[in-house]
Image: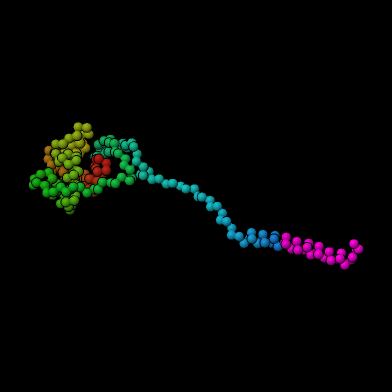
Amino acid sequence: MRYSPRRHAQRAARAGRARYALSLLVVTVCFGLVALTLAAPRQPEAAVAAPVVQRHDAQDFQLASAVTTAVTRDGFSVTKAAPVAARTTTARSAAAPHAGTPDPGTAQAIAKQMLADRGMGDDQFDCLVSLWNRESHWNVYAGNPTTGAYGIPQALPGSKMASAGPDWQDNATTQITWGLGYIIGRYGNPCGAWAHSQSSGWY
């Protein structure tokens, strides 16, 4: 074949156009990839989990053992075991069963009148009856051989009731007078003492 400058120039031009097209294609693809990378939504960064701090109230747990509590009543110390109740346990209400109307002249009738004289109503009388039923069954001679508590209010020791009268050993009025003074001074009223007795077993 004879050399033709014209054909040579045409082939060179075609080769140049091919190289240009190839370069343009490469640039376009690269630009497209960069554009896709920039336009694509960023994946959310993995959240860093904050440390979980579990808080426990000590009262949420039921303890198997009992707590020994020193109980002091008017200077005389007695050690009793007080059960530890779980917080989730429903507390017993301070309300006491209805005591009804006491027979005239009885210790309960005397106590009801003393409460009325102090402006306290039947609800406080109900609590007092339940409290002293538990302590002594309203017996002026009730004595606890273990602790030495004595009388209707179970004064500890019984001789403490001498501050209310010299006949503290056998007089219901003297014992009730002292017992109400103790309850009001320590718990505010009989229902306060009854609530404490319900939760602790003593007052």
Looking at the image, residue 11 lies above or below residue 94:
below
Identify the image quadrant of residue 64.
Answer: top left
Tell me if residue 9 is in the magenta stretch.
yes
Quadrant of the drawing holding the C terminus: top left
Q: Residue furthest top?
A: 145
Q: Is residue 7 magenta?
A: yes
Q: Position of residue 113 (x, y in %)?
A: 13, 49
Name the foreground residue: 121 vs 43: 43
Q: Which range is magenta? A: 1-27
Judged from this view, the residue extending furthest toward the left is 104
Q: Can you see residue 19?
A: yes
| Residue at left offset 59%, top offset 59% | 41
Residue 72 screen position, x and y as percent: 26, 39
Magenta span dominant secondary structure: helix
Q: Estimate the x, y position of residue 68 in percent, counting from the top left.
A: 31, 36
- Image quarter (top left, top right, bottom left or bottom right) of the N terminus: bottom right
Q: Residue 112: x and y, percent? A: 14, 48
Q: How is the image coloured?
A: rainbow
Picture residue at 16% right of the left edge, 36% below the top: 142
Does the image show residue 186? no
Number of numbered discs on residues: 0
Which residue is at the far right? 2
Q: Residue at x 10, y 44 (%)?
A: 106
